[in-house]
Amino acid sequence: MTALAAAPRNGELGFWMVGLADKRTSYPRFTGDDSVDLAIIGGGYTGLWAAYFAKKLEPSLSVAVFEAEQIGYGASGRNGGWLSAMPAGNRAKFARASEGGVEASRALQQEFVAGVDAVLDILQAEGIDADQKKSGALVAAHTKAGLGRLVARRDADWKYGLSEDDVYLIGRDEFQKEINISTVHGGLVYKHCARLQPAKLVHGLADTLTSMGVSIYEGSRVGSIDGKTLTLDSGRMTAAKTFVCTEGYSGQLLGSRSLIPINSSMIVTKPLSDEAWQQIGWKGPQCLSDSAHTFIYAQRTADGRIAIGGRGKPYRYGSGTGGAGATAQSTIDLLSTKLRTFFPDTNFEVDHAWSGVLGVTRDWNGGVQWDQASGFGSSTGYAGHGVTAAYLGGRTLAELAFERKTQRTSLPWVGYRAPKWEPEPIRWLGVHGMYRLFGVADQWEERRDSTKTSLLARFGSRLAGLHE
Ligand SMILES: Cc1cc2nc3c(=O)[nH]c(=O)nc-3n(C[C@H](O)[C@H](O)[C@H](O)COP(=O)(O)OP(=O)(O)OC[C@H]3O[C@@H](n4cnc5c(N)ncnc54)[C@H](O)[C@@H]3O)c2cc1C
């Protein structure tokens, strides 16, 4: 049973950031009137990686990163810590949109695979400790229909560039030897995935940037961009080039219908006993997810806790971003129940709950945009797969802006434009409708022991643009 003795901490940017409170570097507020070669708006992974690669390409460049709150305030400080090879979007859609077709989409997939190791190599080279460990990922199927979806997913993975060694199916017994989930029917194993502590990655990158001469400003919201001029509450910056790296918070600068903030919520348990870990297994520690329509994602933390996330309240009317991430008790209960169902013999105490927002385009495909004439670009729309995508997007943006032609600059997500979201209240109804249908579909598949994916889920995917 989950102990309800003490209420968990709630919000406060989440467990990862709270853990760094007295260790993290703070950065000044920008004031005055200045000019810079490159201005980056947003102090999450995308902005920080873009600054890193811009400085690597052009060491003499003056670069300033403007963060409205504190670095890692957004999803980068709050996520599930999966550094995975899952691309930021649907590969079939990228293939259809690209002249290169399936081959172009395979190239994108392979850059995500390469991205996992590239990030790990950079962390090692720069001496950044983010509790990173590459142990792969397991995706559990709790129903026959869910298992069917994993077979289809594996086939699509093989079609779009992963090998039989990169991703493969395992049966129930094999799965339970890795992680002893009571409800599992079988699962998929992904080789290219690492677990990390998200906020440590943010601060490790920022410390590295400071040593490279990048200026980072916190509490420095860019209110508007007019040509080469960025206006902040406290000053003005003229920039030859500007990157917008604001993901789920992009409505203000990129337009409220370009991408919307979709909520994701997490809880973390108190550290588990050695005995509990004996029951559960999970020594890898592999990242863990499942094939439910309302899926979860989880990791075993470096200090022996389980951090698990899922949807909760999916979307706030008018693209609200949820502040510091206070989370409804119903969502905490939902995620705790998942844990109790997976591991019925283990006691869990929830230590902290929080939420954050993903940036989601109308067709759930991300994109890197760069316009040489205006000197303006962005990398956004990663949906739930942004840790590796932010590295790849930030790097690609720097390469495009400083005119380096690489294998990344011609990938099909470069210049990809998703359709616009509908105005309210249609998008609120659409997103909430999709998640309601997903919830009902999960229950239906479980109760009926169905081998087929519910039509309701197919309809929900179509409604919100998630279908192929
Ligand atoms: C709960 C949760 C779990 C997730 N789990 C995973 C996972 O396990 N694996 C994975 O791959 N992805 C995951 N994601 C997604 C991933 O975290 C994000 O895609 C990624 O961190 C996005 O990075 P970013 O730098 O583009 O955006 P953010 O990290 O959101 O950074 C944007 C920043 O811009 C700032 N900002 C906004 N407007 C302005 C302005 N006008 N001026 C200045 N600054 C501004 C914000 O304050 C914010 O700090 C998860 C997301 C959430 C919310």
Image (tube, rainbow, N blue to C red):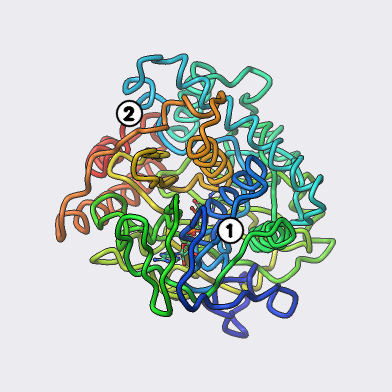
Name the one closer to the observer, 46 or 16. Answer: 46
Look at the picture and state if 124 lies above or below 396. below
Q: Position of residue 24 (x, y in %)?
A: 70, 73
Q: Quadrant of the N terminus?
A: bottom right
Query: For the C terminus, which image quadrant?
Result: top left
Which residue is drawn at the image coordinates 25% and 57% (left, top)? 256
**The quadrant where residue 446 appears:** top left
Above/below status of 389 relative to 330: above
Looking at the picture, tell me which residue is in the foreground, 9 or 60.
Answer: 60
454 vs 174, left or right, is left
Taking the image as shown, residue 40 lies to the left or right of residue 120, namely left
Q: Secondary structure at mark 2?
A: loop
**Is 104 positioned to the left or the right of 279 in the image?**
left
Q: Amino acid at mark 1?
A: Ile
Instruction: Mark 1 and ligand 1: say if the CB distance to the nearest ligand atom is below 8 Å.
Output: no
Outermost residue, right side: 274
Q: Secondary structure at mark 1?
A: strand
Residue situated in front as seen by the camera: 362 or 204: 204
First in sequence: mark 2 vs mark 1: 1
> Residue 47, image x and y in percent?
53, 54
- For the point 75% across and 50% down, which residue is it? 132
> Label 2, label 1: how many angstroms apart (C-alpha)?
27 Å
The answer to whether residue 238 is above or below residue 219 is: above
Residue drawn at 58 percent across, 80 percent down: 9
The disc label shown at residue 468, or none = 2
Residue that numbered label 1 is attached to: 308
Q: Amino acid at mark 2?
A: Glu
